[in-house]
Image (cartoon, rainbow, N blue to C red):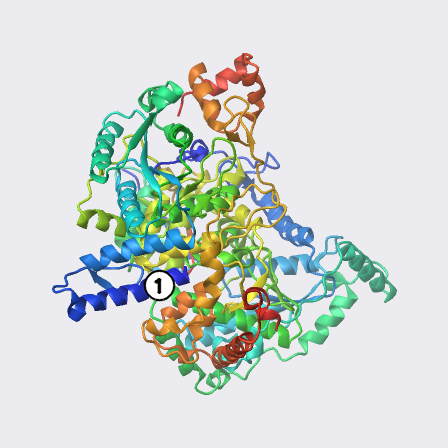
């Protein structure tokens, strides 16, 4: 049983508009049997945080193309993307590079 | 249809599982923080160097900005134009030999009125931006979009461009600049600190005394009733595609006008490689093939005396987003017309989602030139705008080119076939358009017949309007002027024997 | 194009008015035309469609009286409509052309064999002579055999290159002056997009031309009379005319990349119905800076067909197949052309690279 973890989530480049315009979020993910990974985080965000138009943020099981993801200030492509196993107090940043956010 | 000669498929393999490589490809020992293209992982330090170098290399390679020239930076507040501003600061503050030597000013066009923002929201983002601008020490101009309703129609005339400078002149000008700077008594180049160059500093002091706002604050600054005019204009445009196109046109006019009135001969825009790829493709979809090169190339000389340049065209939006995030470049998110719109709401949005999906499904592999975005950039580089020769004009400010509608011109090498095709149809086209057939159209009141004067794609935009009299006065009056001139020309041409020749080649010269 | 559109608009109105004015009794509106937004009854739609093709042919001067024209017939909707309309117009306007059907049998079981049956029926329905040239007799390979060797991924390269040459060879055999093909507006627009995506400036410049002049020995001029006809209208025309056509996709044509471009084009059309013609217009107006290097056309030193290399693409592909090195023609291996011509063996390393059948 993995303990609950606290994350710092940040949304930018217009992506924050889907989260009531709030850029910074401290969230606590509940404890669950397996460790949390990015894929599950996206599911959790969709269910618990997204206020409107979820398709503008997640598509399929990943982020919408054009949204960049940084885990602890590094490109998530270096961290295994969806398979990255989240640690307590990680910072995850989502930046939209799309026009109009 | 099946795929004739499609040899690229092997280079465009579906993406593979992300590789987890941890070291920088450049310095080999820094730990990587981002992947620029598939396989190229950079550490923070090398990435910064790469990013900064690319900007000055782009300006250095193209040699269009002469020392001491006044350059207006168009900053929307978005990531790309903010990164551009930071690069200019970086380049001007260097004491290295690669220092930039032009005189910057900043232009921000406040488009909130077109995008349904309240006055308070507009004030708030403008204030945020102005704080950023003030920190640079450069003079800045904040212009509300509503001012397009006060533009003179001269903005639509391409002014005579500065005389072509001979090839070797760039280097000569730089040398001369350095010498005269020395003569004015700067003993060593690095001495003066960040703005060490006395000539630049002097000019900057002079510029900063200029009024930085073009109109007084508050609602009054929008001009009486102008925000209603803008509202009427935009609500008369029925589709988001045409709205975006119209907005872009107006924005360009305002930029050029501001540059002219304040004596700037260059305007820098922050279009990134990703942005230009989308623009290229969506312009094709909107029939803007003839002006692709000027719309997406490094320099856009269509306005003559004011040249638009795009120094960010080699950066992907990913690089820019990472740079801004890592090095604390401030930017302000200002919602636009298309904010939170769906993928299929307009041609540019559809194109953007197509391009980003393509990038994800077929990422540029090890050879950087095969990725879709790079390909666009590459094809643009090779195109050139044909010389204008007929009287159609484009709201974007270019004259409609004479070769419109003709099949591709044969190359110097003669490889391109030119069949007996096109000729009959296309050479008569100009005349046909002068016939009053347009009255058969949707019945939109259009006196003077604006549509028949416009280039193909501006006509598409105007076709999506319910009333063209909502257009800013400078466009309407210029249209009157031009149609009048055209009528005169037509009357005169009845007395001329060789009208075919005249009409095809000499209209605009008159 | 503006001209074409205006002609269209006028004609649509005229013909429809004729219909509603009582010259024709019952008017059933069958279609809203994507180009003009006008609704037309069936008869007026046929007429408008045929007139447009006629206008295209006349204004681009595609044919001269007395010419023999080969219609590239695959049995699909485009070429069936083309054959039908060409026959109608040739009679209605006395073009003075001798028309014949020219088909290529690629040797694809379950696809081409069936569609060729359709062409054979067309031959009787339209009373046009038909000639079929096959890959097997020209190259010694059917597509089925090629796919067996190269797999599904790059087979379209082989098929496309071989078909182009096969049509030319067939046309030469029949002494045809021109070939016309059923490429429609959607195809042309899609090709513009594809060439932009690939950064293929040489093809981008050629692909919107309505006709090609003879590029040299053994190459017959080609034209696309349906260049401005929307696929949608072609399908409707075939449907309402009850034309006999074959509508199955080629069993070997999965290509994600072109699929993307096609889907994008359809989406564009949904946002703005004139988008297809707008893309073509853009393509026609691209101009290329002078001094951009373009491949110089020469001829293949083996078969004499036009080629910018020592060997034409078809010969290289064939050589690859015959040597069991299918990769030879995929990608760029110009350096090896000399060796192939001299019938020299390749080195082990070269062979290893070209054999890799991971595709």
Vertical relation: B453 (above or below) C2: below
Q: Please provide percent x and percent y for residue B295.
A: 53, 59
Q: Image check: B304 left or right of B407? A: right
Q: Chain of mark 1?
A: C
Circle 1 is placed at which residue position? C7
Residue at the spot 54% in from the left edge and 84% down from the top edge? B216
Residue at the spot 45% in from the left edge and 15% down from the top edge? C323
Which quadrant would residue C151 be assigned to in this image?
top left
Please indicate, yes or no, whether residue B7 appears anywhere in the rendered image: yes
Q: Image check: B485 left or right of C61? A: right
Q: Image check: B267 left or right of C159? A: right
Quarter that holds the C terminus of chain C: top left
The one nearer the camera, B122 or A50, is B122
Q: Please provide percent x and percent y for residue A18.
A: 34, 60
Q: Please provide percent x and percent y for residue C273.
A: 32, 59
The one nearer the camera, C321 or C76, is C76
Which quadrant would residue C136 be assigned to in this image?
top left
Vertical relation: C160 (above or below) B216: above
Vertical relation: B218 (above or below) C275: below
Residue furthest left in the image: C26
The one nearer the camera, C261 or B175, is C261
The one nearer the camera, C247 or C258, is C247
Q: Secondary structure at mark 1?
A: helix
Q: Image check: B59 left or right of C55? A: right
Please indicate, yes or no, whether residue B116 appears anywhere in the rendered image: no
Q: Please provide percent x and percent y for residue B178.
A: 81, 60
Residue at the spot 49% in from the left edge and 80% down from the top edge? B480
């Amino acid at each position: 049983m993995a303990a609950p973890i606290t994350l710092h989530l940040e949304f930018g480049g217009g992506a924050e508009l889907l989260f009531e315009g709030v850029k910074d979020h401290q969230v606590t993910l509940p404890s669950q049997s397996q460790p949390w990974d990015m894929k599950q985080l996206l599911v959790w965000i969709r269910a618990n945080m997204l206020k409107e138009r979820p398709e503008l943020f997640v598509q399929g099981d990943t982020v919408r193309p054009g949204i960049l993801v940084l885990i602890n200030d590094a490109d998530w492509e270096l961290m295994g993307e969806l398979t990255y196993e989240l640690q307590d107090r990680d910072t995850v940043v989502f930046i939209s590079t799309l026009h109009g956010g | 249809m099946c795929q004739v000669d499609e040899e690229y498929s092997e280079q465009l393999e579906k993406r593979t599982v992300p590789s987890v490589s941890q070291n920088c490809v450049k310095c080999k020992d820094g730990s990587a923080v981002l992947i620029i293209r598939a396989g190229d992982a950079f550490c923070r330090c090398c990435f910064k160097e790469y990013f900064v170098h690319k900007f000055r290399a782009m300006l250095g390679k193209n040699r269009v900005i002469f020392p001491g020239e006044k350059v207006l930076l168009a900053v929307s507040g978005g990531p790309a134009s903010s990164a551009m501003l930071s690069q200019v600061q970086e380049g001007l503050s260097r004491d290295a030999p690669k220092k930039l030597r032009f005189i910057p000013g900043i232009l921000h066009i406040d488009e909130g009125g077109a995008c349904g923002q309240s006055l308070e929201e507009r004030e708030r983002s403008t204030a945020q931006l102005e704080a950023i601008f003030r920190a640079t020490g450069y003079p800045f101009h904040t212009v509300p979009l509503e001012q397009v309703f006060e533009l003179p129609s001269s903005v639509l005339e391409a002014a005579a461009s500065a005389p072509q400078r001979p090839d070797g002149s760039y280097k000569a000008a730089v040398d001369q600049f350095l010498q005269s700077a020395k003569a004015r008594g700067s003993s060593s180049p690095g001495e003066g600190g960040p703005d060490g160059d006395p000539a630049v500093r002097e000019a900057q002091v002079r510029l900063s005394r200029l009024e930085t706002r073009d109109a007084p604050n508050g609602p009054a600054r929008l001009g009486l009733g102008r925000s209603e005019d803008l509202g009427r204009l935009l609500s008369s445009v029925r589709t988001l595609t045409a709205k975006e196109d119209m907005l872009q046109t107006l924005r360009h006019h305002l930029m050029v006008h501001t540059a002219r009135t304040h004596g700037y001969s260059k305007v820098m825009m922050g279009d990134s490689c990703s942005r230009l790829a989308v623009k290229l493709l969506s312009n094709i979809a909107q029939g803007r093939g003839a002006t692709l090169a000027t719309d997406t190339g490094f320099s856009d000389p269509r306005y003559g005396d004011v040249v638009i340049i795009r120094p960010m065209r080699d950066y992907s939006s990913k690089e820019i987003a990472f740079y801004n995030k890592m090095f604390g470049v401030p930017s302000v998110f200002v919602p636009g017309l298309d904010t939170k719109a769906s993928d299929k709401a307009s041609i540019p949005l559809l194109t953007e989602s197509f391009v980003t999906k393509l990038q994800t499904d077929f990422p540029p592999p090890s050879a950087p030139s095969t990725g879709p975005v790079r390909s666009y950039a590459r094809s643009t580089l090779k195109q050139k705008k044909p010389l204008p020769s007929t009287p159609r004009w484009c709201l974007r400010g270019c004259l409609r080119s004479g070769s419109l509608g003709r099949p591709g011109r044969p190359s110097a090498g003669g490889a391109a076939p030119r069949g007996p095709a096109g000729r009959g149809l296309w050479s008569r086209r100009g005349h046909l358009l002068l016939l009053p057939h347009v009255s058969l159209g949707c019945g939109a009141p259009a006196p003077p017949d604006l549509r028949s004067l416009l280039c193909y794609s501006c006509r598409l935009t105007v076709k999506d309007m319910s009333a063209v009299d909502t257009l800013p006065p400078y466009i309407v009056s210029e249209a009157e002027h031009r149609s009048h001139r055209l009528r005169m020309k037509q009357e005169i041409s009845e007395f001329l024997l060789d009208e075919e020749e005249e009409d095809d080649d000499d209209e605009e010269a008159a | 194009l503006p001209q074409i559109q205006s002609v269209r608009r006028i004609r649509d109105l005229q013909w429809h008015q004729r219909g509603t004015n009582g010259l024709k009794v019952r008017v059933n509106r069958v279609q809203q035309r994507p180009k003009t937004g006008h609704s037309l009854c069936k008869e007026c739609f046929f007429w408008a469609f045929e007139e447009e093709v006629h206008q295209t042919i006349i204004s681009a001067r595609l044919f001269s009286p007395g010419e023999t024209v080969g219609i590239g017939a695959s049995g699909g909707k485009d070429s069936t409509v083309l054959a039908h309309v060409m026959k109608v117009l040739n009679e209605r306007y006395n073009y003075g052309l001798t028309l014949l059907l020219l088909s290529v049998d690629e040797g694809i079981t379950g696809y081409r064999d069936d569609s060729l049956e359709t062409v054979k029926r067309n031959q009787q329905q339209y009373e046009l002579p038909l000639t079929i040239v096959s890959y097997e007799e020209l190259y010694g390979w059917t597509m089925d055999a090629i796919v067996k060797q190269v797999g599904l991924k790059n087979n379209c390269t082989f098929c496309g290159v071989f078909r182009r040459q096969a049509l030319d060879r067939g046309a030469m055999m029949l002494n045809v002056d021109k070939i016309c093909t059923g490429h429609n507006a959607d195809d042309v627009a899609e090709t513009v997009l594809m060439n932009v995506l690939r950064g293929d400036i040489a093809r981008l410049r050629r692909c919107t031309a309505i006709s090609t002049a003879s590029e040299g020995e053994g190459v017959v001029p080609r034209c696309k009379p349906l260049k401005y006809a929307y696929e949608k209208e072609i399908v409707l025309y075939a449907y309402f005319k009850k034309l006999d056509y074959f509508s199955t996709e080629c069993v070997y044509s999965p290509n994600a990349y072109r699929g993307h471009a096609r889907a994008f084009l359809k989406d564009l059309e949904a946002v703005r119905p004139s988008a297809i013609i707008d893309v073509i217009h853009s393509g026609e107006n691209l101009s290329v800076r002078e001094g951009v290097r373009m491949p110089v056309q020469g001829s293949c030193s083996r078969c004499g067909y036009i080629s910018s290399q020592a060997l034409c693409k078809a010969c290289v592909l064939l050589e690859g197949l015959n040597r069991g090195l299918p990769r030879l023609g995929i990608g760029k291996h110009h350096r090896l052309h000399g060796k192939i011509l001299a019938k020299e063996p390749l080195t082990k390393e070269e062979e290893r690279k070209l054999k890799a059948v991971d595709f």
